[in-house]
Structure formats: structure tokens, C-alpha cells
Image: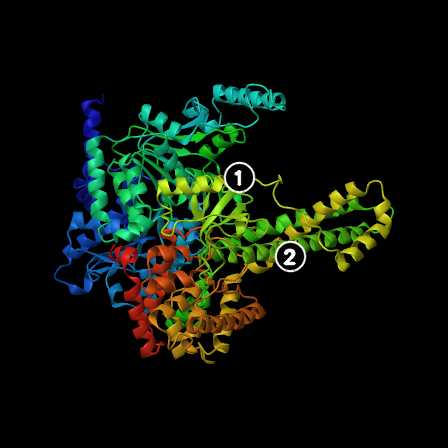
Amino acid sequence: MSSPAERYAAARRRAAQASMFPALDEFALDLGFDLDDFQREACQSLERGSGVLVCAPTGAGKTVVGEFAVHLALRGKAAAEGDAGTRRKCFYTTPIKALSNQKYHDLVDRYGVDQVGLLTGDNAINGDAPVVVMTTEVLRNMLYAGSSALEGLAYVVMDEVHYLADRFRGGVWEEVIIHLPASVTLVSLSATVSNAEEFADWLVTVRGETAVVVSEHRPVPLWQHMLVGKRMFDLFHDADAARKHDVHPELLRYTRDTVRRLELGEGRSAGPGGGRRGPRWRGPMRPDIVDRLDREGLLPAILFIFSRAGCDAAVQQCLAAGLRLTSPEERAEIRQVVESRVTAIPGEDLSVLGYWEWLDGLERGLAAHHAGMLPAFKEVVEELFVRGLVKAVFATETLALGINMPARCVVLERLVKYNGEAHVDLTPGEYTQLTGRAGRRGIDVEGHAVVVWSPETDPRHVAGLASTRTYPLRSSFRPSYNMAVNLVGSVGAEPARALLESSFAQFQADRSVVGLARQVQRNTETIEAYGAEAACHHGDFDEYFALRVAIADRERSLARQGQTQRKAAAVASLERLRVGDVVRVPSGRRAGLAVVLDPATGGFGEPRPLVLTQDRWAGRVGPGDFTSPAEVLARIRVPKHFNHRSPAARRDLAAAVAATGLDRHGGRRGGRSRQPVGEDHRLSQLRTALRRHPCHACPEREEHARWAERRRRLERDTEELRQRVAGRTGSLARTFDRIVALLSARGYLSTEGEVTDAGRTLGRIWSEADLLVAECLRRGVWDGLSPAELAAAVSVVVYEARRDVDERASLPRGAVADAVDETLKLWSDIEADESARGLSVTREPDLGFAWPIYRWTRGEALAKVLASGHEFDGEMPAGDFVRWARQVVDLLGQLKDSGGASAELRSTARQAIAEINRGVLAYHAAA
């Protein structure tokens, strides 16, 4: 209890602060809660006139500082009402449209619809308002265009500024920070990063005085747990143990005992009458985890599963287990919300999208959330979760970005995720970001993060992830063609070079060279030591080892050729299938007998017949499911109007497949048959040379080879480091010079360094393939196409498959194929030019989305459209289709407004947009 003297002193301090910071005192009165120390410190810096960088955990309340900048702008405007010249504005930027919409509605609720505007790619509302919420790209485009909306701009809030590390869009944040007028005060809001001081040092060099406010404090404490089988353990005994990374002794003891029992069980269960425990660990089932969380009062929860299919499967498993987390009243409310949100989607599309199964899960309080879902469905899941109606969401890590969707508990099923190229461990930063969702401010007293244990998961590793605060911000900025013409056009070539030198990317590059050079020196010394160990008294071991490497490379090359031939044979066999053919799927989840329902020889992409398996699963299979050509084993009659969505019809036909008496696995066990590769002449020569080499007879040959392999790897790594050292100092300016030279050679810049008409067209194209799009416009590649043909033709410069596909996708014949061939020729020409100048090459056009968008624009049914996606084993996920279709629409929107496009092309682009925006796309266009 404080004394009267202490209370009096505190009141005096508050009064002094109010007199020093009147705007903050005014702002705080309307908040309805007390400001945290970091919020107060940041707001005071702003009122003093300084820029500010705020780094704080998810849910800590960083946006309050951004809202204070809005308050300062409106307060300044009110104070200077009579003087139009001093009108003050605030732009509030966010990385994604959904966040912009959310923040717009928050500010409208507080300040009124007249004071707040919204500008995104889809919406333009009251753009002249004193406060405008927008995506970062919109502000970047305004700066390059010299928009009149920038007059009177006093504050820019950059929410989620750590997005500048994003390798696709991060450069936009740096462009804005560098190009904003010096009179604008910048408010940067970031998640907790470990190099905040470095980022702030850079902000000071480009923006002037910038206060750094870092808070590690979570407003809702987070408790870390591990679920081992059916037992839940605290990861740390107390807060002091957490600081020291000391794992709870009981958890360590129990997991070690469990691993020991598993190892003993593996030894005992070698025969049919083995021990009680089998060799494989079976962790808790997903329905059991949700049920456990429900009983312990830890719902609502987000369960992170790093796979779209895994998220969908988790919901199905919970439904099959009879899990129900909602009351009758909640179920009625859920159905009402869902039905009101999907009215714009046609009924036939809903059944294709699995609407009824999705609704069944929602009504039980269960849902998936991932990028493959229809955006409308994802938005409903988000709304119902925030309202507390959906209790358990199975999500991929994309949910951790941006959208405000906190939970009481977060569960991590694994600590490994697929990053698009390989399975990699979660970083401490990713772990912090995912678990940061746990604990809702003002609702929960504490949040909980649960990691599901498996024998590969060491609790000490989890403790390291939970306790480490290493999430460095790394710039992804690099000059693009569009950026180059805009910079040259606005400030000239030499000042543009200086601007690029002032980027955060160059700031970090210059600092890192010293450390890299030291590493090169250490590696060189180690390489010499490895070379001494690899030396052989029989002869030149370097020469011998080079032969071994050449043999391994040749064998890999021949194996790849064999895989291509096998796939071609499987494709040809699938193309010959007819309705009623019974085949054997040799491997994978659908292994066994199957009957063909629809041969799907539609003339686009690889064949993917619709089949029904002996286990009653109906779906499409592709060449990837067949390790050898599909062989017709029997024929059975398939009813003429067979409905594969009917369980009864599936059951009857599956019984007919079983009645053929064929063995579902055939006579062979094991996967692919190993066919000997025909003897290769070059391989024979290399093997002969290897056997004749004197070092081949050395008894310590393999030991020498191990040292030689280590040296080879280290040499490769060291060469990469040398290139990085050579390329970093002044690297952005050199890249910019090469880009300018290429643009000058192609006529986008004149010899005097002026932007030409073609350059002005390029400056208004916002796309990764900006130069390729500009070239297509100049050469009239897209002229004379119908709306559907135009959508298909432009899709190839937008779309990028989630994974590499060996063979090229097919295209609609005629005008589309001609336009795409011409586009590929232009790309090849650009790529050769880029390679010759040492520039990163423009990504090769991807044909995989041409058929889906072509069919959709022609008005075909969603089911047919989704079935025509190229690289998917089954149907193209609806969420992927909508996302790529929106990107096609975005590029078509740029074409319809482009001064470099013919009048006919602009008109066709308008028609194509109108024809694409129907059904599931019409909903999204309105959203």
C-alpha cells in the first residue's frame, strides 16, 4: 500500500508529464486502459518530433503507437484549420489487404468515416481523407508517381515493418523508407528482432533522429509445455529456469525412460511374438489432443500442422472420432454466420468446394486454415474463431502472419517444416512467432504453448527455441527494372545510385564483409590441412578423387534419364485407359486395385483418370502414382450415370472390383523394379581409368577419400564466400549500373539517360516479370486475342508452381499457344542478355495455370476448372486457384490502364476482368 506522500509524488509526476506531453495525455484519456511503459516511451518520442522504431512481441499493443501518430496528425489539422497550407495527414501502411481492411474499420470506429480513407489494390475509399490506410505497395507507387496526395503528409506508420525481410516483397518497404520526404516522421512497428539497434542505426542515417523502443515483455505470460503420450509436462520449472534454459528434470527423466523402453521394445519385437511395445512410437491422436485441451480449459486453440493435407486430415479425424465442442445455440449461430457469408457462391460450386463437410466441422467447433482454402472460407473461419465459436483450428504457419487471431493455447505437432525446397527445423524466430499467438490480452490470464513430443524431439532443443531471442532482420532489397526507370525518371541516374547505396541491404552488406573475409582465411588454412591428410604415397590422389566424382555425376545423370523414361511409359499407359478398366496402383496411399470411372483424356496436361479404389476412395491418380506402366487386369461394368460422390454407389462398385478375385498387391513385393541401365560408354571409360590408377591399390584409399571429400565441400563453400565478399562492397550500385545498361540497350532509357515512352510504360508495370511484360506489350504479343485467350497468355508471366514439374504443361491450341511461344522467345532473349551482364535472370514463364484460367474465363464450371491444374496430383486447391486468378486480374488491370497497350488490348483486358470476376471470384472481388 503506498503512503499519501508517495501518491502525491506520483500525481505530481503525472501532472508534469501531462504538461510536457499534452497530446499524449489527451490521447490516453480516450483509450480506456493504462499505457504500458514501452507504449508511453514511444509516444513521448513521437510528440517530441522524433521518428520511432518499436519492437515488441505479438499482441503487446504496438499499434497503439501507430494510432497515436494518427491522433497527432488530426490534432495538428484541427489546430491549423484556418490554414489550408498546413493541413497534416497520416498514412497507415500494412503488408496485406486483410490487415488494411481491419485497421480501416478500427480507425473509422474511432474517428468517423469522414476522417479515414482506404487504398488497396481492390478498394479506393475516401482517398483524400487526412488519415488513409493503405498497403505498402500503394504508397510506393504514389512516391514514384509524385502524387498530389503526398502534400501535407506528416506521419507514415509502417505496421509489420519486419516484412522487409520477405524475399518477394520486402524491397518495397526500403523503397518507401528511402524515398519519403525528409519532412515526414516515420513510425516503424516490428515484431521482436535481435538486431533492432542495427536497423535503427540505418534508420538514423536515412531518416534522421529515430528513437528505438524495445520491449521483450509479453502482456499475457506464456507457459511452455510438452505433451509426451498422455502426460503433459511443464518445459521449465519456473521463470528462473526458463532464463537459464534448464529443462524440467521430471520431463527429461520421463522422455529418456520412454526412449529406452522404445529401444528395448524394438529389440524384443523382432519376431512375431515380440515384446509389448513395438518399435514405432505412436504419439497422441489429434482428436485426443483436442479433447485433452478441452478438458483442461485450454480452448480456443490453434494447432499448427505444417501441411495443408495434414490440416484437412486432422479435421476429418476429429469428426470421425465424434468430437463436438459447441452447444446447440453456438451451432445455430455458426450456421447463420456461414450461410450469410456464402450467399454469393453458386450452389454447384459449393458442393465442389466440400462445403457440407466444411460446415459440419464448423458446427462442431473445428476447422482447417491454410492457403489452399477458398479465401471466403478462410475469412469465415477467422471470424468464428475470434468470436469464440470455433474452438480448434488446424493451421499452417501462414496463419501466424498478419491476421489478428489470438488463442488461449497453441500446439506445435512437429518442429520441422517444408520451406518449398527441403524439410528444415523451425528457427527460434519462427517458434516465437507461432507461439506468440497464445494468450489473448484482456481475456486470458496466461497463454500456453504445447509441443507434442516424439523420440526425435529433444526437450533441451525445445528449451533453446523457447528461450532464444535470435530473429535478425535481413534485407531482401535488390534493384528491379521498374525501380530503375522510376528512379532515373524522378531523380536522375547518379542520384539514383546514391539512393541505392543508402539502402538497408547495402548497410548490412558493408558491415558483414569483415566477418566473411575472416571466415575465408580460416577455411583456406583448413583446406590445406585436409589436403595433407588426403595425400597418398601411391600417386596423385587429387587426380584419382576427380575420377570418383566424375563417375558419381555420370551415374546420377543416367538415373535421371531412366526416371524420365519410366514416367513417359506411365503417361502413355494412362492415356490408353477406358471406363471400366481395372488396374493396380502399385504404390502410395492409394495402392491396390482400382476401376477407371473417367479416363480424363481432355487434351491438356498429363492424364489423370478418375478412379475408384477397392477401399472406396474416389479421386484422380496421375503418373506419379505409377512406378511402372498401368496394366489393364480386367474389365467390369460401370453404371452409365455413376455418381462417385454417393457412398452407396461407391460401396457397390468397390465390391465388384473385389469380386474380380485379383490380388490387390500382385505377385511382387517392394516398389519399383530395378532395370539395369544400358552400359554407358563414358561411364565404362571412367571406371577403367579409376581401376588402373595407382591410388586404387592403396589400403588407406577410403580414408584418403573421406578427407578429399571434406576438402572438396569446404573449397566449394569458400569459393561462394569469396564471391560474396567480392560482390558485397558497392554491390547494389554495380547491379543498378548493369540494369541501366541493359535498359538503355533495349530502348527504355535514352543515351542521355532520359526515360523513353517505352520506359514510362515499364515504370507503371508492377510485376516480378516487369521487363518481360513490357516487351510483350511493345511487340504486340497479346494483341488480337479473345478475353479467355488473353487471360491464359498473361497467366504464364504471373503463375509459379509450388513445386517443380518435369514436363511442360500443354496449352489451348491456336492463338494462346502462339502468344505463349512468342513470350517464351522474348524471355529467352532477355535471359541471355541478363546472363551476359551478370544479372539475376527473370523467372521462366510457367504454363501451369493457362488451362484453368482459360476455362474459367470462358464460363466453364468450377469442377472442370480445378481438374485442369497442371502440377497437382488431384484437383487444384480452390484457394490456389483464387489467389492466382486474382494476380492475373491484377496484371490485366495494369494492361487496361497502360499507355503502352493498344486500344483493342485495353478493351479486351477490361472484358477479361469482367468475365473472371464471377462465382468464387466475384465474392473475392467484392471482399
Side of 114 where 556 appears, left or right:
right
Q: Where does label 2 land, which residue?
A: 561
Q: Secondary structure at mark 1?
A: loop
**Is residue 755 visible from the viewing direction of this image?**
no
Q: Secondary structure at mark 2?
A: helix
Quarter of the image for residue 304 reads top left
Q: Does 628 sit above or below residue 387? A: below
Q: Quadrant where the C terminus lies?
A: bottom left
Amino acid at the residue labelled 1: Gly
Q: Which one is nearer the viewer's eye here, 49 or 616? A: 616
**Label 1: how many residues lie within 10 Å, few (<14), some (14-19) or many (20+)?**
few
**Is residue 552 visible from the viewing direction of this image?**
yes
Distance between the alpha carbons at the discs numbered 2 and 1: 37 Å
Q: Where does label 1 land, which residue?
A: 661
Quarter of the image for residue 130 reads bottom left
Q: Earlier in the sequence, mark 2 or mark 1?
A: 2
Side of 891 where 635 appears, left or right:
right
Q: Which one is nearer the viewer's eye here, 549 or 353? A: 353
Q: Quadrant where the N terminus lies?
A: top left
